[in-house]
Image (cartoon, helix red, strand yellow):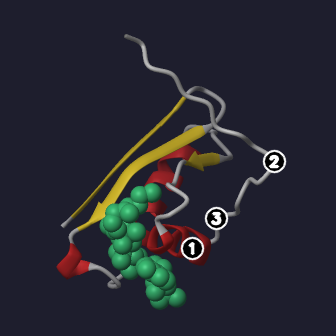
Amino acid sequence: MGAVLCGHDGRRGFISHLAVESGSRRLGLGRALVERCIGALRESSIDKAHIFVFAENDDAVAFWKKIGWGERSELFMLSRYTA
Ligand SMILES: CC(C)(COP(=O)(O)OP(=O)(O)OC[C@H]1O[C@@H](n2cnc3c(N)ncnc32)[C@H](O)[C@@H]1OP(=O)(O)O)[C@@H](O)C(=O)NCCC(=O)NCCS
């Protein structure tokens, strides 16, 4: 019903691809998946984690803020293609 990827680079955690199927949302599954990630990171002595969210994904932004994540307006994301 839901999935998430989580890892770390030895200092910071990175969570990505969180998704809960549309018929199972608003039941606490998204929060539970994130809490599993946070717990595992804590066990690895990682005390902070990041998530990238498309700015227009209003639902996701609302979700992350509701469960206690804060916006990092001082950061600017840069990307490039490898080909
Ligand atoms: C974002 C997503 C994972 C949330 O999953 P979920 O299982 O519905 O979230 P939860 O039920 O655990 O919600 C946790 C809290 O966030 C709130 N919340 C969830 N979606 C919300 C929304 N769209 N707007 C406002 N609040 C929301 C819930 O009400 C809940 O608050 P509460 O504990 O006070 O009741 C889900 O909507 C989803 O899969 N979206 C599509 C994929 C996506 O955009 N993923 C994020 C990529 S960064």
Residue 11 shows in the view: yes
**Under tag 2, what secondary structure?**
loop
Residue kind at label 2, given as amino acid type: Glu
Q: Measuring from the top left, give residue 7's x and y in whole percent.
A: 46, 36
Residue kind at label 1, given as amino acid type: Ile
Q: Assess disc 2: are there few (<14), some (14-19) or many (≥20) residues with their C-alpha within 10 Å of its C-alpha.
A: few
Q: To which residue does mark 3 refer?
A: 69
**Above or below for 37 versus 13:** below
**81 relative to 24 in the view: left or right:** right
Badge nearest the viewer, 2 or 1: 2
Q: Residue at x 75, y 43 (%)?
A: 75
**Under tag 3, what secondary structure?**
loop
Q: To which residue does mark 2 refer?
A: 74
Classify residue 45 by image quadrant.
top right
Give the residue at the far right of this rendering. Answer: 74
Tell me the tag on residue 67. 1
Q: Marks 2/1: CA distance? A: 21 Å
**21 relative to 45 in the view: left or right:** left
Which of marks 1 and 2 precedes in the sequence?
Answer: 1
**31 relative to 47 in the view: left or right:** left
Which of marks 3 and 2 precedes in the sequence?
Answer: 3
Q: Marks 2/3: CA distance? A: 15 Å
